Image (tube, rainbow, N blue to C red):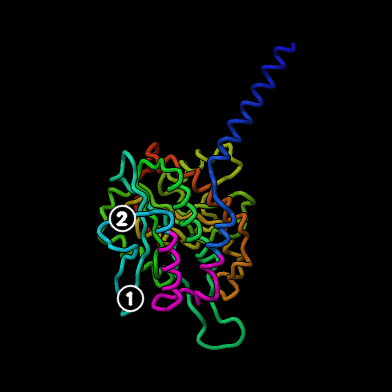
Amino acid sequence: MNRIKSLLIFAIIAVFSVSTFAQEKIHIDTTTVRKHLYTLASDDMAGRKPGTEGIEKAAQYIEGEFKRIGLKKYNNLKTYRQNFEHKGIKMFNVIGVLEGKSRKDEYVIVSAHYDHLGTKKSGEGDLIFNGANDDASGVTGVLALAEYFAKKGKNERTIVFVAFTAEEMGLVGSRYFGKDIDASKFVAGINLELIGKEPKTGPKTAWLTGFERSDFGKIIQKNLEGTGYKLFPDPYVKFNLFFRSDNASLARLGVPSHTFSTTPIDIDKNYHQVSDEAETLDVGIITETIKAVARGTESIINGKDTPTRVVIKEKKK
């Protein structure tokens, strides 16, 4: 009887140890997450509208973090910026690369848009659209994931980290990025948007746009089993969100590219308002979501899983 008890206790300890070890593998520093969020959503960035001094400051911050982390330049670019012009406005995506080991010619893109709406032209009181949730929270995720995977150093596939510009103007930055790529080499797109609030699915959950369009979401769900974190299909189908964020630019090329989000947008009073400030968000939720994305996508980044390609047929309204 004592031997049976001993074996049972040993088994429980072993399971607990394995679980604890698995949880400890994801190191995302909450202090750094807070720093990224509050910097990018600060009044000093003046709403990060393309063509303004504010977005220039945001780009410089992202570039500085890419350099600190040790990311390489993309393709033949001499800097982290992919420069182009749109409607007379000089724009730039900010791109950093973590080269893969055994499958470096296969790419996974991790993205978010760093632009927002700028400032009100007139009025009283707060005039700055800080864009904390939309989408400083997502860019925070990109920076944190870049640091996580760079420190881990075990990505078999190459990871391309991108802060897209001018998403709010019609996915301009991501469309430009997609113009000259070989889409067949991009195996997945991981886009982060509005990850700073608890969704209606409850704590430690997120939702994914276009869930039914590839098996990307099912791969994430499988990888999250036993972690206490769950991923759900987009509950806002009528809003057509799959086509309203930067994932769509790559998805239209066949890349299984989807957006992670946590925000209950149907009742969010801060969306596209000057009240979308860092203080309205939960840094803990952002941190837990980043950890979940890291764990959920790791098998794709390491080459174990390859999501099915997306076939785009936009639904008629």
Q: Is residue 84 magenta?
A: no
Front-most of residues 146 and 311: 146
Image spot of residue 219 (x, y percent): 46, 41
**Amino acid type at mark 1:** Lys
Q: Main secondary structure of the magenta part?
A: helix
**Amino acid type at mark 2:** Leu
The residue identified by callout 1 is 90
Q: Return the mark for residue 61.
A: none
The residue identified by callout 2 is 253
218 displayed left or right of 249:
right
* Badge nearest the viewer, 2 or 1: 1
* Quadrant of the rendered image containing residue 24: top right
Q: Write the residue at 50% across / 77% down.
A: 46
Residue 84 lies, with reference to residue 146, above or below; the image says below
Q: Which residues are magenta?
A: 38-65
Element at badge 1?
strand
Image spot of residue 27 (x, y percent): 54, 46
